[in-house]
Image (cartoon, rainbow, N blue to C red):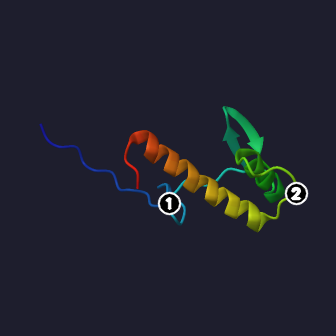
């Protein structure tokens, strides 16, 4: 029993990853099991406003980001307290 002869590799048919080795990004994103077109920055800001308690009304993006950061710190403190490991 001899070994089979190897076939030469055709370099023209070999698959190459993109320049970063990651799959290409799609023009659509999947949210909650459905496919939606990418939203614009104002749509994303509006969604962020809906996630934080102080996001009601007209608020500038820089204020929105600060309120979001403050809310994250508040939630982290709550989690620490509930876990019994205050930091």
Identify which residue, 4 or 64, lies in the foreground: 64
* Figure check: 47 above or below 65: above
Q: Which mark is residue 84?
A: none
Q: Quadrant of the C terminus?
A: bottom left
**Which residue is disc 1 drawn over?**
12
**Residue under the image location 52 percent in, 57 percent down:** 22
Q: Is residue 27 visible?
A: yes
Q: Earlier in the sequence, mark 1 or mark 2?
A: 1
Q: Nearer the viewer, residue 59 or 48?
A: 59
Residue 67: quarter of image? bottom right
- The image shows residue 31, relative to residue 67, as above or below, that is above
Mark 1 surroundings: few (<14), some (14-19) or many (≥20) residues within 10 A? few
Q: Crowding near pointer 2: few (<14 within 10 Å), some, many (20+)?
A: few
Can you tell which of label 1 and label 2 is closer to the viewer? 2
Write the residue at 45% across / 40% down.
Answer: 82
Residue 21 placement (x, y as % from top left)? 49, 60
Please state, as top left, top right, bottom left or bottom right, where the N terminus lies in the image: top left
Question: Disc 1, disc 2: CB below 8 Å?
Answer: no
**Which residue is pictured at 49% across the width and 54% down the height?**
15
Q: Residue furthest left?
A: 1
Image coordinates of residue 3 in percent, x first then y, are: 17, 43
Quadrant for residue 18, please give it. bottom right
- Element carrying mark 2: loop
Disc 1 and disc 2: Cα gap in Å?
A: 57 Å
């Amino acid at each position: 029993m001899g070994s089979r002869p190897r076939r030469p590799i055709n370099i023209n048919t070999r698959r190459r990853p993109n320049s970063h080795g990651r799959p290409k990004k799609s023009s659509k994103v999947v949210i909650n099991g459905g496919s939606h077109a990418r939203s614009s920055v104002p749509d994303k800001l509006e969604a962020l406003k809906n996630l934080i308690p102080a996001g009601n009304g007209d608020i500038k993006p820089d204020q929105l980001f600060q309120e979001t950061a403050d809310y994250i710190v508040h939630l982290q403190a709550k989690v620490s307290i509930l876990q019994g490991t205050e930091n």
